[in-house]
Amino acid sequence: MRTILPALFAFALMSATTAAAADLSSGTHKRVGLALWPDQQCDDRGITRKIAKRFNWAQRTTFNRDLQIAELSNPREYAFRPAEPQFHDRRFCQADALMSDGRHYPVYYMISYDRHPPLGGGLEFCVSGLDYFRAYAPGCSQLRPH
């Protein structure tokens, strides 16, 4: 059993990589599973739903708070950085979050695109004023291009 599971995982990973390579060689980019591809824009509903879902989960399970994103509106791109030797393509976005307590906060997020389906999802976000660990501090500046 121990040798079967790694083999199945390797086969699934190779299948996804092969499908992605076929899409890239044809000049089209598609969403493959959880992978993010360059056709996904800042206003993609899948992206904004994923942000709300992750934020709401963290508030509930990590911080034991009832605060949730009730709505993300006005998603927009404010920068795109094409691939460089040490980076992949990156799209920088901002949206307005209406919280369950009625307050509004800006949300900054970055969509990064790998040449193959990224395992981590390629999405980073920060709700300004609610970055408790200051992971993107100050004021979510680490998710805004300089």
Image (cartoon, rainbow, N blue to C red):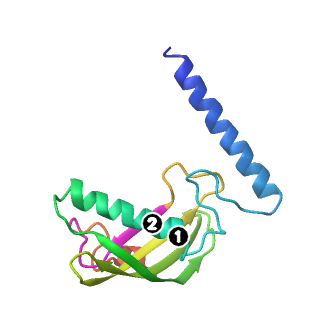
Task: Tell me how far mark 1 sits from mark 2, CA to CA.
Answer: 6 Å
Q: Is residue 126 magenta?
A: yes
Q: How would you rate the neighbour count of disc 2 (Cα within 10 Å): few for under 14, some for 14-19, many for 20 or more?
A: some
Q: Residue furthest right?
A: 26
Q: Position of residue 67 (x, y in %)?
A: 22, 69
Q: Amino acid at mark 1?
A: Arg
Q: Report the residue at 22% width, 53% height from top.
A: 61
Q: Amino acid at mark 2?
A: Arg
Q: Quadrant of residue 125?
A: bottom left
Q: Report the residue at 38% width, 61% height from top.
A: 53
Range of residues picked out in magenta: 123-133
Q: How would you rate the neighbour count of disc 1 (Cα within 10 Å): few for under 14, some for 14-19, many for 20 or more?
A: few
- Is 70 rendered above or below residue 105? above
Q: Is residue 68 magenta?
A: no
**Secondary element at tag 2:** helix
- Is 39 rendered above or below residue 75? above
Q: Report the residue at 58% width, 55% height from top.
A: 35
Q: Which residue is mark 1?
A: 45
Q: Position of residue 103 (x, y in %)?
A: 24, 84
